[in-house]
Image (cartoon, rainbow, N blue to C red):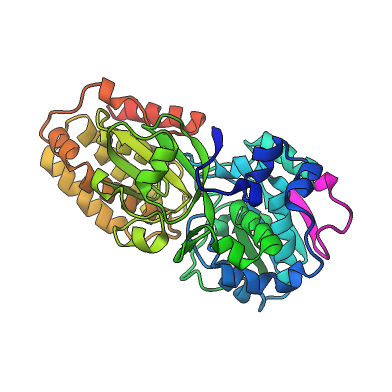
């Protein structure tokens, strides 16, 4: 993936990818040359600074970072968990940070640990990302003893997977259990696994914390918009000239993001947030890339994914292919995941190949209703959101397939990325269904 400093991002002033832009290196010397040392009082003031900055989580949910810390302070010596799992196949931002700004991530983890009185920092990098693991091992080794304050730091490699990077799944794994999500009635509570309190942050969130500690809340807000301050990493893919990971200012239009990546020629739809996200139409590309504005059209930034599907492609074929993958990534702990998701994928595959007609569409709608809100975790809800928005945005494709007129084989060429092993499995399942 390309790593590009987008127009308007002041990399030289110390944004996320500044070290790469200015030095092309990720070692501690280059890091300190660009960003400088953390001040002695940085940890003492960081909670107030992060609150004033309006920093929200970059892992998908967009939860206010300072509020998460307030909840964790009531727990006895919580564990800070760094989520660098990159479970979303269409995203590459965690890998970019681990390879090009690992010390920013570690600085942020150190500051959080000091702010909440954590006794341990655990960095989670998926077992299929040895390059990211090596980058973190080297970065940790470069830092002086005691660099993490009173907290110990260790690196662990949970199994790669779509749901294993969910924060409760990581908490479970760090506590000695299986990397599988567990039910949480609401996110506004301390995350506890096996009686251990966990504070889980995405790697990008922590990198922002490190920059806020150095430059302050006003500096952070000098980029972005009033209700969506700062910069963010976005993985832009699909029908664009230069797919890659870009650092962009929040609040600009979705169309502007596509332009940063060379522009989409003629997109029929754009996926926002990832494979648990939402499809939007070309007429909605003027929407600001900000939580509030995107909520108004039923979308969110999610995991920082913007994927454009060209008009020549078959949108339904893309959705069916991803649905098969998502069904295979089930946590396997409740009926909606074990039975509901494969049934939804099967219906989509049937419609995709031109079988079943209106009866299959009606059955699919019933299954989406039956699955929504009934999962042990939020994976089924993400699949329902992804599929429902696709049925709306790709309504013409869906109608053509349902009346027995599927798209040509050329239009079914894959556009959206999948992990190679899982992509092969999804295609094998597709062949079996046909």
Q: Quadrant of the N terminus?
A: top right
- Picture coordinates of residue 215, whole percent (x, y): 67, 61
Q: Is residue 325 left or right of residue 216?
A: left
Quadrant assignment for the C terminus? top left
Picture coordinates of residue 214 (x, y %)? 71, 61
Whether residue 378 is visible, yes or no, is yes
Read off the magenta span: 140-157
Residue name at image x 65 percent, y 51 percent: 13
Above-or-below relation of 169 to 6:
below
Q: Residue at x 59, y 72 (%)?
A: 51
Q: Residue furthest right?
A: 145
Left or right of residue 205, residue 316 in this image: left
Residue 153: in magenta span:
yes
Q: Nearer the viewer, residue 261 or 187?
A: 261
Magenta stretch: includes residue 65: no
| Residue drawn at point x = 53 percent, y = 53 percent | 231
Residue 188 lies, with reference to residue 308, above or below; the image says: below
Report the front residue among 5 and 97.
Answer: 5
Task: Compare residues 15 and 407 and report the one nearer the observer.
Answer: 15
Residue occupying image coordinates x 48% and y 50%: 303
């Amino acid at each position: 993936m390309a790593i590009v400093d987008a127009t308007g991002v002041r990399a030289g002033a110390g944004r996320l990818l500044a070290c790469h832009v200015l030095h092309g290196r990720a070692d501690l010397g280059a890091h300190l040359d660009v960003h400088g040392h953390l001040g002695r009082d940085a940890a003492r003031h960081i909670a107030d600074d992060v609150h004033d900055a309006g920093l929200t989580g970059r892992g998908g949910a967009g939860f206010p970072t300072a509020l998460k810390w307030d909840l964790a302070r009531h727990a006895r010596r919580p564990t800070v968990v760094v989520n660098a799992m990159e479970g979303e196949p269409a995203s590459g931002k965690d890998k970019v940070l681990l390879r090009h700004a690992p010390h920013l991530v570690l600085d942020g983890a150190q500051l959080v640990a000091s702010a909440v009185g954590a006794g341990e920092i655990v960095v989670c990098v998926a077992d299929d990302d040895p390059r990211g693991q090596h980058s973190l091992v080297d970065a940790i080794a470069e830092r002086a003893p005691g660099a993490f304050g009173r907290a110990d730091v260790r690196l662990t490699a949970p199994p790669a997977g779509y749901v294993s990077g969910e924060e409760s799944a990581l908490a479970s794994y760090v506590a000695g259990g299986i990397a599988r999500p567990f039910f949480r009635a609401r996110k506004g509570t301390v995350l506890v696994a096996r009686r251990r309190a966990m504070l889980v942050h995405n790697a990008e969130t922590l990198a922002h914390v490190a920059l806020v500690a150095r430059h302050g809340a006003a500096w952070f807000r000098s980029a972005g918009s009033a209700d969506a301050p700062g910069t963010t990493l976005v993985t832009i893919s699909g029908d664009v000239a230069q797919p890659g990971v870009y650092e962009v200012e929040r609040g600009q239009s979705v169309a502007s993001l596509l332009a940063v990546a060379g522009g989409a020629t003629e997109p029929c739809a754009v996926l926002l947030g990832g494979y648990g996200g939402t499809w939007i139409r070309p007429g909605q590309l003027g929407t600001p890339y900000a939580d509030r504005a995107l909520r108004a059209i039923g979308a969110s930034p999610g995991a920082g994914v913007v994927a454009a599907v060209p008009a020549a492609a078959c949108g339904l074929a893309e959705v069916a292919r991803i649905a098969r993958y998502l069904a295979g990534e089930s946590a396997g702990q409740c009926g909606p995941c074990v039975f509901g998701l494969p049934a939804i994928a099967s219906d989509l595959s049937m419609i995709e190949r031109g079988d079943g007609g209106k009866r299959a569409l009606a059955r699919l709608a019933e299954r989406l209703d039956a699955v929504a809100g009934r999962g042990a975790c939020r994976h089924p809800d993400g699949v329902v959101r992804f599929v429902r928005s696709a049925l709306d945005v790709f309504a013409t494709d869906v109608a053509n397939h349902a009346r027995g007129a599927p798209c040509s084989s050329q239009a079914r060429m894959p556009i959206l990325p999948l992990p190679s092993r899982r992509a092969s499995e999804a295609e094998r399942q597709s062949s079996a269904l046909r």
